[in-house]
Amino acid sequence: MTAAIAALALTSACAMPPQGASPEQMAAYDNAVASMGCEMRTEREYLAVELQTGLTREQTIQAGQFRMASGAAVPLEGGGVKLVTGACA
């Protein structure tokens, strides 16, 4: 398990939107994760989201934590995140 994936398993109660991420990038994050079946678990999936959104790895992790804290996503067993709203509902 990579450090990025493990980081998503941490509690996200105090999560904030990624610093420097625009509302458009957050919408692109949702669309990118949805395009991969609504789950982000592997290095390949993280890279795809980063390329589609222009977010850094840290911002991508923070976006997942923020979505979990707001109830728009849930953590996956073993690490990762699954969106549960919008196209993923």
Image: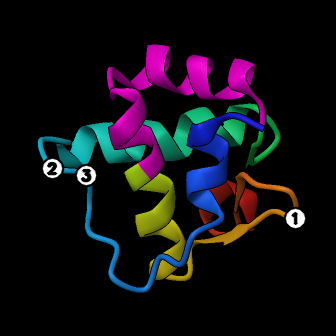
The reply to whether dot 2 and dot 3 touch (C-beta < 8 Å) is yes
Distance between the alpha carbons at the discs numbered 1 and 3:
23 Å
- Indicate the quadrant where residue 35 lies: top right
Q: Is residue 43 magenta?
A: yes
Magenta part of the chain: 42-61
The reply to whether dot 2 and dot 1 touch (C-beta < 8 Å) is no
Disc 3: CA contacts within 10 A as few (<14), some (14-19) or many (>=20): many
Q: Is residue 88 left or right of residue 37?
A: left
Q: Position of residue 80 (x, y in %)?
A: 72, 51
Label disc, if present, on residue 87 of the rendered structure: none
Label disc, if present, on residue 19 of the rendered structure: 2
Q: Is residue 68 left or right of residue 39?
A: left
- Farthest residue toward the right? 77
> Residue placed at 75% from the left, 48% from the top?
38
> Residue placed at 30% from the left, 37% from the top?
25
- Quadrant occupied by the N terminus: top right
Identify which amino acid the numbered label 2 is placed on. Answer: Gln
Disc 1: CA contacts within 10 A as few (<14), some (14-19) or many (>=20): few
Q: Position of residue 85 (x, y in %)?
A: 63, 69
Compared with residue 3, is residue 54 higher up or lower down, i.e. above or below?
above
Compared with residue 84, is residue 60 higher up or lower down, i.e. above or below?
above
Q: Earlier in the sequence, mark 2 or mark 1?
A: 2
Q: Which residue is mark 1?
A: 77
Disc 2: CA contacts within 10 A as few (<14), some (14-19) or many (>=20): few
Q: Main secondary structure of the magenta part?
A: helix
Q: Which residue is mark 3?
A: 18
SS at circle 2: loop
SS at circle 3: loop
Q: Earlier in the sequence, mark 1 or mark 3?
A: 3
Distance between the alpha carbons at the discs numbered 2 and 3:
4 Å
Q: Position of residue 12 (x, y in %)?
A: 47, 76
